[in-house]
Image (cartoon, rainbow, N blue to C red):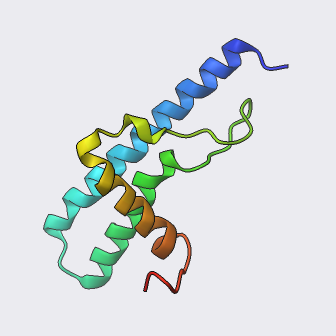
Amino acid sequence: MKNSRDVILEYYAFMRLADSDLIVARRSLDSLKRVKHPDSVCAIIRDSLISYARPFTGNRGVVKKRNLRLMESIIPEALKASHRNVMGIRDQVVAHTDISYR
């Protein structure tokens, strides 16, 4: 049986990790100002996409076994199209090799 305290603690831990992922994505993008080598730029962009998308994809917890994620509803309306674009790139190019995208 799921203890409500355990559910709350797990959600808190997830939110802390999600916050950390979003900070990493931002810092990675900020570092592009100092990087010139194309291979490094590609790696940083890939890292940023993965870090940004991680909290919005299905994550597993201990108490909540599946679907631990940030909901798209937290994204401001003005940024939803950009969010969907980033998630699409992550899904079709970084996480999978969708020929249709290329």
Say which residue appears at 45% left-offset and 54% top-offset: 53
Residue 61 appears in the rendering: yes
Q: Is residue 99 left or right of residue 2?
A: left
Instruction: State whether residue 30 is above or below residue 40.
Output: above
Q: Is residue 32 left or right of residue 49?
A: left
Where, quadrant-wise, is the C terminus in this rendering?
Answer: bottom left
- Give residue 57's position: percent from left, percent from top: 55, 50
Q: How many marks?
A: 0
Instruction: State whether residue 25 is above or below residue 9.
Output: below
- Give residue 51's position: percent from left, percent from top: 43, 54
Residue 48 appears in the rendering: no
Say which residue appears at 33% left-offset and 68% top-offset: 44
As drawn, the residue found furthest toward the left would be 33
Q: Is residue 10 left or right of residue 17?
A: right
- Give residue 87's position: percent from left, percent from top: 43, 59
- Give residue 2's position: percent from left, percent from top: 79, 20
Instruction: State whether residue 73 is above or below residue 27.
Output: above
Say which residue appears at 35% left-offset and 53% top-offset: 83
Where, quadrant-wise, is the N terminus in this rendering?
Answer: top right
Place residue 34 in its image quadrant.
bottom left
Place residue 29 in its image quadrant.
bottom left
Place residue 19 in its image quadrant.
top left
Say which residue appears at 70% left-offset and 13% top-offset: 4
Instruction: State whether residue 89 is above or below residue 61.
Output: below
